[in-house]
Image (cartoon, rainbow, N blue to C red):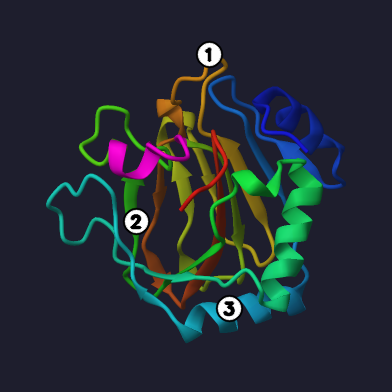
């Protein structure tokens, strides 16, 4: 088990079907059909059970900056245990560094405007979210279903856009080699135009997760 950025990036390509996205600006990977259909369906059902309006750090006053819904997924549920084990096996990251798994639901017209997963070191909420466990390091996001139209994830500064596909994993390092935050990981959960989009997200921290 590790929390070393270098070892994680070196480990990921060994997984069958894993592709490193060609860009010098960030460590970004995708893997189609990472999660089987039955597990995707189970995670969608769990997300629907207890979803609530999503929130943001460093509120910028835009009431429609993030309009999705979020569900914290209990660690003792069989489907959650299964996907957590898959992510641990894939990344080699010690589970102690991981935040609880989250599900997100985007109905038609909902989006998450361009944002970063790391907490801005100069942001007013930085101390609140990072004092105990440090900043976020890696993001692992999985699309749980196909979407009729829209709902892509766009990395504008990398000139890369990823369409939702059931079971597809997208993962990236939020840090630079020197440990600083990587501004190029800015990304936009674009508006769903037709249907509903479900994803799950797993974030890892610099230190052991303490809630």
Residue bearing the label numbered 1: 178
Provide the residue span drawn in magenta: 127-135
Residue found farthest to the top: 178
Label located before the other in sequence (2 or 3): 3
Q: Residue at x 68, y 27 (%)?
A: 4
Q: CA distance from mark 2 to mark 3?
A: 19 Å
Dot 3: element:
helix
In this view, the residue in front, 172 or 92, is 92
Residue 109 versus residue 120: which sits nearer the camera? 120
Circle 3 packing at 10 Å, graded few (<14), some (14-19), many (20+), is: many
Q: Quadrant of residue 81?
A: bottom right
Mark 2, residue position: 112
Q: Which quadrant would the N terminus be assigned to in this image?
A: top right
Please name the residue shown 59% across and 38% down the image. Answer: 172
Question: Can residue 50 be found in the magenta stretch?
Answer: no
Q: Regarding mark 1 in the picture, which secondary structure is present there?
A: loop
Q: Is residue 133 above or below residue 37?
A: above
Q: Which mark is residue 44?
A: 3
Q: Quadrant of residue 65?
A: bottom left
Q: Is residue 134 above or below residue 194?
A: above
Whether residue 34 is visible to the viewer of this picture, yes or no, is no
4 shown above or below 73: above
Q: Earlier in the sequence, mark 2 or mark 1?
A: 2
Q: Residue at horizontal 54%, vertical 33%?
A: 206
């Amino acid at each position: 088990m590790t929390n070393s950025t270098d070892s994680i990036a070196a480990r990921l390509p060994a997984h069958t079907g894993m592709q490193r996205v060609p860009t010098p600006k960030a460590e970004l990977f995708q893997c189609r059909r990472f999660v089987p259909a039955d597990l995707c369906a189970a995670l969608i059902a769990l997300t629907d059970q207890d979803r609530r309006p999503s929130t943001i750090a460093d509120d910028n006053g835009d009431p429609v900056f993030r309009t999705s819904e979020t569900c914290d997924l209990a660690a003792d549920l069989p489907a959650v245990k299964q996907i957590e084990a898959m992510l641990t096996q894939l990344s080699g990251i010690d589970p102690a560094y991981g935040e609880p798994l989250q599900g997100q639901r985007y109905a038609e017209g909902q989006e998450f405007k361009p944002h970063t997963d790391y907490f801005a070191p100069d942001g007013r909420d930085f101390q609140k979210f990072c004092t105990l466990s440090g900043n976020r390091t890696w993001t692992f996001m999985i699309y749980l279903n196909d979407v009729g139209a829209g709902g892509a994830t766009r990395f504008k500064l990398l000139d890369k856009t990823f369409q939702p596909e059931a079971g597809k994993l997208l993962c990236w390092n939020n840090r630079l080699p020197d440990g600083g935050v990587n501004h190029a990981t800015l990304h936009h959960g674009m508006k769903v135009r037709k249907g509903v989009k479900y994803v799950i997200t797993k974030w890892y921290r610099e230190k052991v997760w303490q809630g």
